[in-house]
Amino acid sequence: MTTPLRARASRTETGYNFAYLDEQTKRMIRRAILKGIAIPGYQVPFASREMPMPYGWGTGGVQVTAAVLGPDDVLKVIDQGSDDTTNAVSIRKFFVKTAGVATTTSTADATIIQTRHRIPEASLKAGQILVYQVPIPEPLRFLEPRETETRRMHALEEYGLMHVKLYEDIARHKTIATTYAYPVKVDGRYVMDPSPTPKFDNPKMHRSPALQLFGAGREKRIYAIPPHTEVISLDFDDYPFEVNRFESPCALCAATGVYLDEVILDDAGGRMFVCSDTDHCEGRRADGHRGSMLGDAPATLASKANVGGRADDV
Amino acid sequence: MTFDSDRPLLAAQGLTKHYGARMGCQDVTFDLHEGEVVAIVGGSGSGKSTLLQLLSLQLAATRGSVHYRMRDGATRELGTLNDAERRFLMRTDWGYVAQDAANGLRMQVSAGGNVGERLMGLGQRHYGNIRNEALSWLDRVEIDRDRIDDQPIAFSGGMRQRLVIAKNLVTQPRLVFMDEPTGGLDVSVQARLLDLLRGLVADLGLAVVLVTHDLAVARLLSHRIMVMRHGRVIEQGLTDQVLDDPREAYTQLLVSSVLQV
């Protein structure tokens, strides 16, 4: 997927190797990715590198993106669904600077989407790669602290403990209270942590035509879901898996059936619910959808209501 | 409960464990039948805990073998089981009650979750059924039903031990290993626990390997007794016979050392 540096030299003269990492490291990461794809949901250890950002800011995702990025790719980076938050902007700038790739905020135009905490609302298509930033890849970690033991449990497919966690949820809260990082079973074999995405997004992973890659930098693990793989959220027969529901549509674009963020407006209890996926929301407003809080604002304003211009149009 | 009385449930042959140059236990051979309770007694360092760990596959023997009749009737040598078979056996057909209940429980998981863990491990996926099963087991071990959602961290020592017992028995094992199950509990709690154990063992027809240094516990629970010293079994027989009429000098010493109230 990557072309040699000399082919790119005319386009970036930054002093960095293409996409920051050296070629040997990218090769090592690609091997881990290939193994991950071959064994869907299995956590492949890899020699995670120091990146010029702190752990917890997406060092795993950045390394995976660097390893699969080519000069002709179009990169989109989102954080909590938004293209405009600090993490998303700085990672996008990082790859513009070190790889000179084109970037976009449009889900449909992107070939690689690096994400923290969300899966875009628009359906992904074949050929796209979704790269997740993962803080804690081990779904059994909070029940079984020993890595030696969790590995053995994965190897022997002993996943009863995962249901103990869901049992505890129901016993305490009368419902499965896990709302993010909701465990899934991939391809009928490995139980996997989908990273802290809301469980609302879990069904989007199931048989997605896009390739999904997960990178955990601090924990040094990579795992993958190949396109069209079965991804089932764990549940009980009498407490089936359900996605989050929202009572009102998006206040700006009137979308329903999407994941909404709650935004506090004042000290008097004022609040609005608005699409967490900014690209999706902007697209709908450009198409003329108007939510309750948009009122009769002029059309040009309405389509950029929560953007205020892009800070990183380099 | 039907017993296959012709063939032993578990047969140990020449079990030996060396810790480097030191000996843990030496050349132990015995049979255990279904529904039979055998006590292993002896002083500290006599090798009784080593023997229990060998039998329950927590330690690998230096020499010797343990044969076990599985639920399907086939007798297997336990040393030849693979990891998956061994762990499956341990969490279905076996139970293990240690002296410290905290070792056998998940202290941050509710009592119901602890009892239900084995069921969920076996693939049960109906919350209501798992919870009902847990409730009925709490009844059997005399823990109040309204404690089902409490964590064992909030339980007394005696309650924790009873919870361990419920957690182990929920899959209806045929063999339970007990390592000083009443150690560290005060005498009135001990008495209740022993009463409970005796009732459950008789009701369910459990085979038990019981390690204890307390001869009164052995007397109360076990049918047969094995006395160990320096890693060897020096005397064995029916519990009453051995305790009332000990042959070996060391056994006589043990029996005569029991304090009379």
Image: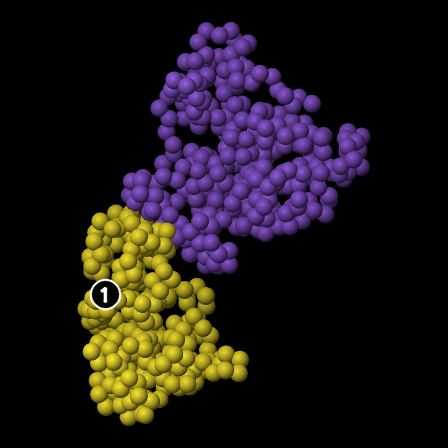
Residue at the image position 36 percent from the left and 39 percent from the top: A177
Mark 1 — residue?
A: B189
* Image height of B230 relative to A12, above or below: below
Q: In this view, does A77 lie to the left or right of B170?
A: right
Which color scheme is applied? by chain
Residue B200 shows up from this direction:
no
* Circle 1: residue type: Val
**Residue A151 in picture, x, y percent from top left:** 50, 56
Residue at the image position 33 percent from the left and 75 percent from the top: B211
* Image height of A213 relative to B150, above or below: above
Residue sitting nearer the eye, B25 or B243? B243
* Image height of A73 relative to A28, above or below: above
**Residue B235 in picture, x, y percent from top left:** 32, 88
Residue sitting nearer the eye, B241 or A65? B241
Quarter of the rendering occupied by the C terminus of chain A: top right
Q: In this view, does A30 lie to the left or right of B67?
A: right
Say which chain is purple: A
**Residue B94 in picture, x, y percent from top left:** 33, 67
Quarter of the rendering occupied by the N terminus of chain A: top right
Say which chain is yellow: B
Disc 1: host chain:
B
Q: How many labels does the image show?
A: 1
**Residue B93 in picture, x, y percent from top left:** 32, 67
Residue B205 in which image quadrant:
bottom left
Residue B252 shows up from this direction:
yes
